Amino acid sequence: VEDIDFRLDWTTPELVGAKTLAVSLSDIAAMGAEPKWALLSIGIPANIWDSDFVDRFYDGWFTLARHYEVELVGGDISRTPEKIVFDSIVAGEVIKGKAILRSGAMPGDSIYVTGALGGAFGGLMLLESGFRYSNSSKRHQEIIAKQLRPVPQLASGKYLSEHGIATAMIDLSDGLSSDLRHLCQASGVGARIYAKDIPILPALSEVTVAKDQMMALGINGGEDFELLFTSKEKNLSSLNLPDAQRIGEITENVGRIEVIAGNEITCLQPGGYRHF
Amino acid sequence: VEDIDFRLDWTTPELVGAKTLAVSLSDIAAMGAEPKWALLSIGIPANIWDSDFVDRFYDGWFTLARHYEVELVGGDISRTPEKIVFDSIVAGEVIKGKAILRSGAMPGDSIYVTGALGGAFGGLMLLESGFRYSNSSKRHQEIIAKQLRPVPQLASGKYLSEHGIATAMIDLSDGLSSDLRHLCQASGVGARIYAKDIPILPALSEVTVAKDQMMALGINGGEDFELLFTSKEKNLSSLNLPDAQRIGEITENVGRIEVIAGNEITCLQPGGYRHF
């Protein structure tokens, strides 16, 4: 939704097209599935219809779709009074019984995330502060790209599914604090995570110098589209997933999510993106 | 899309929910298929989220879905800055090789429509003139209901598919003049229709007294969601579809759509709803 999920003066039509598909592919990745086909509905005001926006949007969308061999099979085009809206749906395929759900985490499982967190929210902060990709420093561009050009973790998701490693999985769209809660609620468990183990994007030191604020970005910032998964394996090396980092373990304390920082234990409140 | 496809002060949330599904079911009917599952994405502003709108919308949606045994299998909920948007997708099933496409019409085929035309557009005219369903006469209510409560012609579509009667089919969403053009374009043919045979909703005489204006409503008015189909059968009675009316025949004049009114032949311009 324009002005909720993206702003035209922050990005390009091609990047909006690619991100529209990427966020759906991320959901497919989070089930350990392979994307197959997509439905795309777009609603646009008449003045945008008359511009090159739609052609450039589809360029971005189809470039990513070809890369992952996703076929567009349907959708709709409507006129809207003012704002642009997209509805993106992707169907994927997974071997029967191998789909990774949110509901399979058990007490004692280790909790992992792929990649580094906080970048997408840091990029949002930069954009909101008036920085733009085109006239930014290399370090700022790295952060802004995390917001504008998310990468769906399809290879990691498929690896975890094929090797039966993950017991539960979700993609980090709303933020670690919210999405870990979603996973724990679906599994009927609690979690304990260690602040020192949460991988924060190093470049974020460009956005804020305060260490605890960097941590807050990593815990609450949404849209990184990395994978959060649980596993019986306690040994990271056995996963053979180089960018997976163990950040904690599943507990029996239903609904309770603890963050251990040094000697302090705090209970995590959901601080990620709330749709309403 | 709110204020493009519907207005909240013209209808009820339940009727918006039912129509959102009905227009997708109509597409399924037009292929002679049976609806199976649906995806529904809704985008709503915060003030509507806080009202009873969403519950009542779903009531209307699910009542119709249960009636046709359609299962909701996915979708999304988003916040919008101002206007309500819905994206409705329905998947249907049809025996392999029995799906009726837009592209199968051949010169010499007869052209049929189900039901009576112009009602939905007449209802729109009444609503735009300030009439409302709740405080209208019985005759006005009949017309307004055509706009607010469309009926997908699933039984007729399935009958035509199962008996192999229709060579091509489309539902009348944009209006006869536009949708007949879509069908002719897809089939690479032309058409000749007879003004006297086009079934116009009798109650429309309440909206306009001029006979040629009633005809214009029937030819150009959209959203009746009746079926337009072609058939090798020249004899209506053999169809055993009581509300099907023969209105003309397919010709070899590619792209040319003629309307015969008495001794006059006019070439039809697409006058139905254009999205842009």
Image: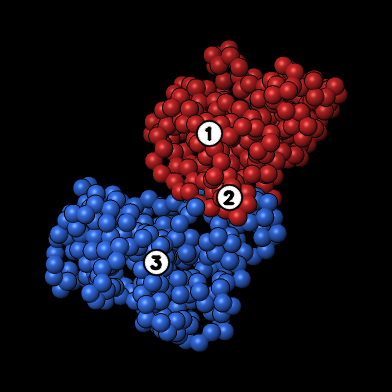
Chain colours: A blue, B red
- Residue A232: which quarter of the image? bottom left
Please determine whether, in this image, residue A231 is positioned above or below residue B26: below
Three-letter amino acid code at the position of disc 1: Arg
- Rounded to the nearest whole Å, what is the CA distance between mark 3 and mark 1? 33 Å
Which residue: 69% across, 36% down? B9
The single residue placed furthest to the right in the displayed view is B210
- How far across and how far down the image is residue A260, in percent? 25, 70
Q: Secondary structure at mark 3?
A: helix
- Residue A220, label in figure: 3
Which residue: 67% across, 55% down? A82
- Rounded to the nearest whole Å, what is the CA distance between mark 2 and mark 3? 24 Å
Near-viewer residue (A229 or A218) = A218
Which residue: 59% across, 47% down? B47
* Residue denoted by label 2: B45
Which residue: 50% across, 72% down? A124
Label 2: how many residues lie within 10 Å, few (<14), some (14-19) or many (20+)?
A: some
